[in-house]
């Protein structure tokens, strides 16, 4: 497979596996009487395993399933580290707007006595 | 996997657990543990002196460049939020200091953080994978929730319960019961 296509595939699977991991942890550690995490956690774990097997078969540098999971999680976290600055630009734009906000004219409060 | 890498992943796991504990809702009493667990995760990342192998080593280098501006910028955003006229009351010291800190974070970003050459590719497809996973999660939760049978309608209130409700409403609206 083309190396750029492979790279794209690794990044996509990296983000996919990282988010799946996070959601599994989230469901387990925010367990409460009304949550039913069994099926989602089982399906997500299965998908992580399948993704790791695919990466293991495509990437020659990866020897075991654990290595494949480590490799993908690193790709996923790198992606997050790149996206966060762009999210902060959006946040700073809204903070800028919030900083210079003025109270609209109020007939009752602002009327001359 | 060597000790340094195991500690690195333990720190990442603690960060994820800490964020999960912070959620509101029926499990909100656990949110008290959120910040301490996140702090332990950050400390484990910072003070992990054991040698780390690849691919974690490359990631740790990126985190080392990312962390200074991220924490400074987050602090600045927090202060600006505290100082902004959300309820029409401006707190100028927080607002001004917050913006100064945000400007300092820009400097730290350009000085220490280096985006990879293919950053658009990484950002685009990593987020695509993450969104795909989130979408699948929503579908799975919807599937599970749809499978839960509806509960029987609640029985009518007894006379005693009706009186109790009337009493509470009367007290709240300041009208004497007849």
Image (spheres, rainbow, N blue to C red):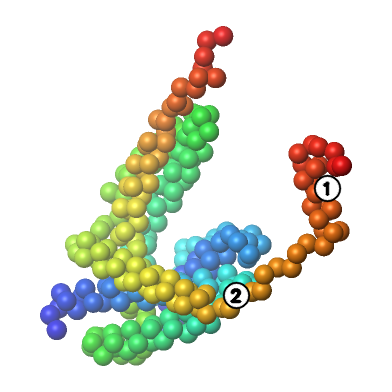
The location of residue B43, given as percent across then percent down, is 52, 63
Task: Please name the residue that numbered disc 2 is placed on.
Answer: B150
For numbered disc 2, what is the local secondary structure? Answer: loop
Which of the 4 image quadrants contains residue B153?
bottom right
Q: Position of residue A15 (x, y in %)?
A: 33, 71
Residue at label 1? B167
User: The disc numbered 2 marks a residue on which chain?
Assistant: B
Query: Relative to residue B13, is residue A16 drawn left or right?
Result: left
- The quadrant of the picture occupied by the N terminus of chain B is bottom left
Using the rendered view, name the quadrant where residue B171 is placed. top right
Check the image and name the residue furthest to the left: A2
Mark 2 or mark 1, which is nearer the start of the sequence? 2
Using residue B44 as the reference point, say whether residue A56 is left or right of it: left
Label 1 and label 2: CA atoms lie apart by: 32 Å
- The local secondary structure at tag 1 comes to helix
Q: Quadrant of residue A52?
A: bottom left
């Amino acid at each position: 497979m083309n190396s750029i296509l492979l790279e794209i595939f690794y990044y996509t699977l990296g983000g996919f596996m990282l988010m799946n991991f996070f959601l599994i942890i989230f469901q387990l550690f925010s367990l409460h009487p009304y949550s039913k995490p069994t099926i989602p956690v089982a399906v997500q774990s299965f998908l992580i395993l399948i993704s790791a097997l695919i990466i293991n078969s495509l990437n020659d540098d990866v020897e075991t399933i654990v290595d494949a999971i480590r490799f993908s999680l690193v790709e996923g976290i790198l992606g997050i580290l790149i996206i966060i600055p762009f999210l902060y630009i959006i946040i700073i734009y809204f903070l800028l707007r919030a900083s210079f906000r003025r109270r609209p004219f109020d007939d009752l409060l602002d009327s001359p006595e | 996997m060597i000790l340094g890498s195991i500690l690195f992943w333990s720190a990442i796991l603690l960060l994820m657990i800490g964020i999960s504990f912070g959620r509101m809702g029926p499990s909100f009493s656990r949110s008290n543990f959120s910040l301490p667990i996140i702090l332990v995760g950050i400390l484990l990342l910072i003070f992990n002196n054991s040698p780390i192998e690849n691919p974690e080593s490359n990631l740790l280098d990126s985190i080392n460049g990312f962390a200074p501006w991220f924490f400074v910028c987050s602090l600045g955003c927090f202060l600006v939020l505290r100082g902004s006229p959300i309820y029409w009351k401006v707190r100028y010291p927080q607002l001004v200091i917050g913006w100064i800190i945000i400007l300092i974070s820009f400097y730290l970003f350009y000085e220490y953080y280096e985006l990879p050459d293919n950053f658009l590719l990484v950002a685009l497809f990593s987020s695509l994978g993450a969104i795909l996973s989130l979408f699948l999660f929503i579908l799975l939760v919807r599937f599970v929730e749809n499978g839960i049978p509806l509960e029987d309608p609640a029985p009518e209130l007894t006379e005693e319960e009706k009186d109790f409700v009337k009493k509470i409403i009367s007290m709240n609206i300041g009208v004497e019961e007849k």
